[in-house]
Image (cartoon, helix red, strand yellow):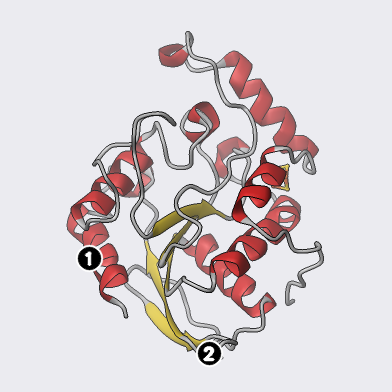
């Protein structure tokens, strides 16, 4: 089933970010993100958790758009910045920095001085879900925000990087909802898989797949640093 873009589109990234942060559409996720922010993990018991939806991070005229699944309960749901304060973020920002796309190789807090270069990181679901598993309905509820964000980034976006198979599907569905012609049959996700498409504005763009830098993938060696680096090297070199 195709997604349809039902929300009246918000006209700037800044306003969209504000709208996302104030969202309470999914009762289960609102309860979970707020409960985690009160109960906390012992290592962070003296910190004030963010406990709200997490918007994208990076310039509103980015060439590279990276899409993950959802905030980590004790990462972005704690720090308020996507992929910040957990192991996934350590891997991601290290690779971005190595490729000249992040100002520093670490991402520990929202005020650590990190600046993304030509790159914006966002996610398909904006609230931390229990077990990192949003329901089908929650994914659907949140989908308009990604569509709106991609719409606003399209004038400069040339490469989309999907971290994991759900992000891959969310990017494709968002691009289709915005009337871009994606190849059929729908390209399948895999690490290093890619396809190009010509947007509704006539501009050629690239979509790249990467395994998600989750602990499940990095601890087991399914995703290595060279594998992640090569994705961003390709993303950066696409013209
Ligand atoms: S997951 Fe998305 S739609 Fe649901 S409450 Fe969070 S921001 Fe709103």
Which residue is nearer to you in this view: 169 or 77?
A: 77
Left or right side of 234 for 24: right
Q: Is residue 170 visible?
A: no
Is label 1 in a helix, a strand or a loop?
helix
Identify the residue at horizontal 59%, vertical 88% (top origin): 181
Residue furthest top in the image: 46
Choose between 66 and 45: the one closer to the eye: 66
State yes or no: discs 1 and 2 in contact (Cβ < 8 Å).
Answer: no
Query: As rendered, which of 151 and 173 lies closer to the eye?
Result: 151
Give how far across and how far down residue 83 sits, in percent.
Answer: 43, 42
Quadrant that contains the N terminus: bottom right
Check residue 183 in the rendering and tell me which mark sits there, or answer none.
2
Residue in view at x 51 percent, y 53 percent: 122
Category of crowding for the residue at label 2, using alpha-carbon neighbours closer than 10 angstroms: few (below 14), some (14–19), many (at least 20): few
Quadrant in which the C terminus is drawn? bottom left
Q: Which residue is mark 1?
A: 230
Image position of 168 (left or right of 238): right
Q: Position of residue 158 (x, y in %)?
A: 42, 75
Task: Give the total number of marks visible in the rendering.
Answer: 2
| Label 1 crowd bin: few (<14), some (14–19), many (20+), radius 10 Å | some
Q: Residue at x 35, y 30 (%)?
A: 112
């Amino acid at each position: 089933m195709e997604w349809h873009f039902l929300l009246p589109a918000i006209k700037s990234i800044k306003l969209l970010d504000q709208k996302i942060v104030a969202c309470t559409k999914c009762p289960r996720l609102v309860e979970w993100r707020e409960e985690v922010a009160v109960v906390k993990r012992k290592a962070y018991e003296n910190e004030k958790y963010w406990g709200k939806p997490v918007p994208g991070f990076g310039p509103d005229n980015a060439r590279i758009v990276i899409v993950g699944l959802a905030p980590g309960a004790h990462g972005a749901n704690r720090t308020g910045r996507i992929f910040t304060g957990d192991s996934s973020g350590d891997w991601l920002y290290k690779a971005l920095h190595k490729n000249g796309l992040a100002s520093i190789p670490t991402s520990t807090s929202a005020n650590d001085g990190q600046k993304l270069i030509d790159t914006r990181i966002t996610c398909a679901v904006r609230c931390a879900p229990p077990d990192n598993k949003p329901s089908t309905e929650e994914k659907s509820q949140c989908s308009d925000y990604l569509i709106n964000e991609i719409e606003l980034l399209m004038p400069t976006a040339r490469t989309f990087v999907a971290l994991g198979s759900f992000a891959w599907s969310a990017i494709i569905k968002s691009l289709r909802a915005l009337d871009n012609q994606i190849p059929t049959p729908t390209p399948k996700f895999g690490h290093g898989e890619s396809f190009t498409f010509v947007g509704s504005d006539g501009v050629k763009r690239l979509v790249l797949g990467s395994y998600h830098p989750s602990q499940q993938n990095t601890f087991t060696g399914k995703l290595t640093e060279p594998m992640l680096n090569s994705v961003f090297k390709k993303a950066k070199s696409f013209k």
